[in-house]
Amino acid sequence: MNIIESDTIANKAKIAIAVVRFNRFVNNNLLEGALDVLKRIGHVKDENITIIWVPGSYELPLIAKALAISHKYDGIIALGTVIRGFTIHFEFVAKECSSGLSRISMENTLPIGFGLLTTDNISQAIERSGIKANNKGSEAALAVLEMINILKIIKNSS
């Protein structure tokens, strides 16, 4: 039986972080959490991290696709916040962003950390972007680091 597991140290990895400008006060916390994990746990150097600010969550898949086909990055972290309003706009944006990022990840065999908050209200968004705990940006960064290493193991074991 073969078991493949990995750690989260990826000190040579090149990471792109796409961050949504809309709801920036929440997304800044997500970005801080992701950067903390990349540097402190993953040992990723500043020069290997690129941050791209995009207008809204709907634009994340397009930027992720452009980053993926550039072949410059080992992983992408997508960070944003969609807060439910009084219309169905929330459902469209959240669904298209989620499915678009998933499709791009699979089509390009490229880890994309899903750090998109989909919340009912601003309080939930603030809670899920916590600096000390429950930061979904941190979780997305951890997932990307581990997936980068797992994909390398799979590629090198063939």
Image: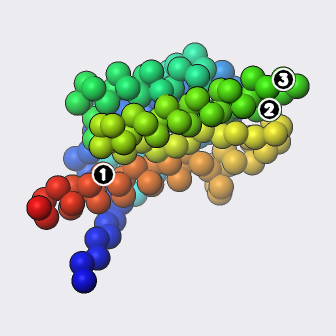
- The residue at which mark 1 appears reads as 148
Which residue is rendered at x = 79% and y = 26% of the image? 88
Residue in the foreground of this view, choosing between 104 and 130: 104
- The residue at which mark 2 appears reads as 84
- Marks 1/3: CA–CA distance: 38 Å
Classify 10 Å Cα crowding around label 3: few (below 14), some (14-19), many (20 and above): few
Asked if the residue at tag 2 contacts the one at tag 3, i.e. Cβ–Cβ closer than 8 Å, the answer is no
Label 3 sits on a secondary structure element that is loop
Q: Position of residue 146 (x, y in %)?
A: 36, 58
**Image position of 80 with respect to 106: above or below:** above
Amino acid carrying mark 3 in the image: Thr
Does residue 10 appear to the left or right of 144 in the view shown? left
Residue 51 placement: quadrant: top left
Residue in the foreground of this view, choosing between 40 and 71: 71
Number of residue marks: 3
Amino acid carrying mark 2 in the image: Arg
- The residue at which mark 3 appears reads as 87
Q: Position of residue 123 (x, y in %)?
A: 82, 42
Q: Position of residue 2 (x, y in %)?
A: 24, 78
Label 1 sits on a secondary structure element that is helix
Q: Can residue 24 be seen in this snapshot? A: no
